[in-house]
Image (tube, rainbow, N blue to C red):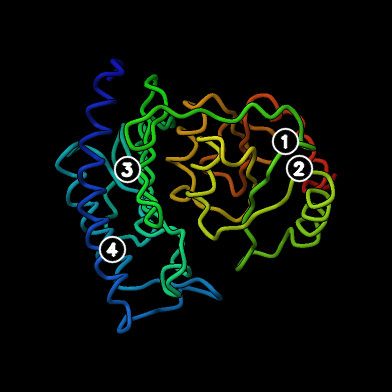
Amino acid sequence: MTNPITYREICFDAMAVVKEAAGYVRDRHEKRENLTIEEKGRQNFVTEVDKRAEEILVAGLSQILPEAGFIAEEGTSQRQGVTYQWVIDPVDGTTNFIHGVFPFAISVGLIEKEEVVAGIIYEFGLDEYFYAWKGGGAWLNGLPIQVSGVTGIDQALIATGFPYTNFKYLSEFMESMDFFMKNSHGLRRLGSAATDIAYVACGRYDGFYEYGLNPWDVAAGILLVREAGGAVSDFEGHEDPLFREHIVCANASCFAEFQSTIQKIMIRP
């Protein structure tokens, strides 16, 4: 598959599946009083909604590319693909979902070999579909989007995510927050990494960084930011952060300064 039109078709077919799953999640969010909540780990929750939404996604996406495998947060499919893998987070921001707080999102990315070639993030609070396919630009509810034009950290609004199970970089992370609170337009934490990255893609945020993430948190967002004109790496500057535990993304104008600042603070020699 080298023709961007094909990626486009896959992206729109996948969006129809995401809309089906989103309808279920929205209905259960409105009737969440009787949620069954499990703890996968300290402050790491899963509900029957996460699992059922993932089942809907797996079933629908399997019809689009029967040969594709799945990397899914709740493990409802263990199928491995040779060329293609769907990377799924059925509810990114489960803690927000449980408490009735927005944002939370569905994130679906398609990997060809090791490259993300299609991505969709649906954020429930504002009813926003962010989507992109390789070579096709980035879109929000039918309109093209692009990253901001901010040229320096001193003008930037930065987003991050607080660690909740992995505290290995906690002292460095606290230092980074201190720096950005004092040297930028401000620091924000919404509770959904997928949403944060989508907001970088459409220019609401100028940069985002977080550690302790998984592929399903970032797959769709990586493509969105790049197709919107931004840049993505891990803390150390590697351009393939999908299977690494940390990510940096920003508009192209301030990315180098942003990434080097995070590397200096977060990665000790």
Q: Amino acid at mark 3?
A: Trp
Q: Secondary structure at mark 2?
A: helix
Q: Are marks 1 and 2 in contact (CB under 8 Å)?
A: yes
Q: Which residue is mark 3?
A: 86
Q: CA distance from mark 4 to mark 1?
A: 35 Å
Q: Tell me if mark 1 has few (under 14), some (14-19) or many (20+) residues whose alpha carbon lies within 10 angstroms of its own.
A: many
Residue depth check, mark 1 versus mark 3: number of the one nearer the observer = 1
Of mark 2 and mark 4, the one earlier in the sequence is: 4
Q: What residue is drawn where x is 30% and y is 69%?
A: 49
Give the camera-side residue of 179 and 144: 144
User: Mark 2, residues whose alpha carbon is within 10 Å: few (<14), some, or many (≥20)?
Assistant: many
In the rendering, at what x and y percent does residue 248 appear?
64, 40
Quadrant where the image shows the C terminus: top right
| Label 3 with label 4: CB-CB less than 8 Å | no
Point out the frontmost of discs 2 and 3.
2
On residue 25, which mark appears?
4
Helix, strand or loop at mark 3: strand
Please name whichever residue, 26 or 166, is drawn nearer the observer in this view of the structure: 26
Q: Work out how far the residue at label 1 is from the one at label 2, CA to CA, in angstroms.
A: 5 Å
Mark 1 vs 3, N-terminal side: 3
Residue drawn at x 80%, y 37% is 154
Local crowd at mark 4 within 10 Å, few (<14), some, or many (≥20)? many
User: Residue under circle 1?
Assistant: 259
Say which label, 2 or 3, has the lower sequence index.
3
Residue depth check, mark 2 versus mark 4: number of the one nearer the observer: 4
Q: Position of residue 44 (x, y in %)?
A: 50, 71
Asked whether the residues under the numbered discs 1 and 3 touch, taking CB atoms below 8 Å apart as contact, a structural biologist would say no
Q: Residues within 10 Å of mark 3 (few under 14, many from 20)?
A: many
**Residue bearing the label numbered 2:** 262
Cβ–Cβ below 8 Å for labels 2 and 3?
no
Which of the 4 image quarters holds residue 12? Answer: top left
Tag 4 and tag 1, C-beta contact below 8 Å: no
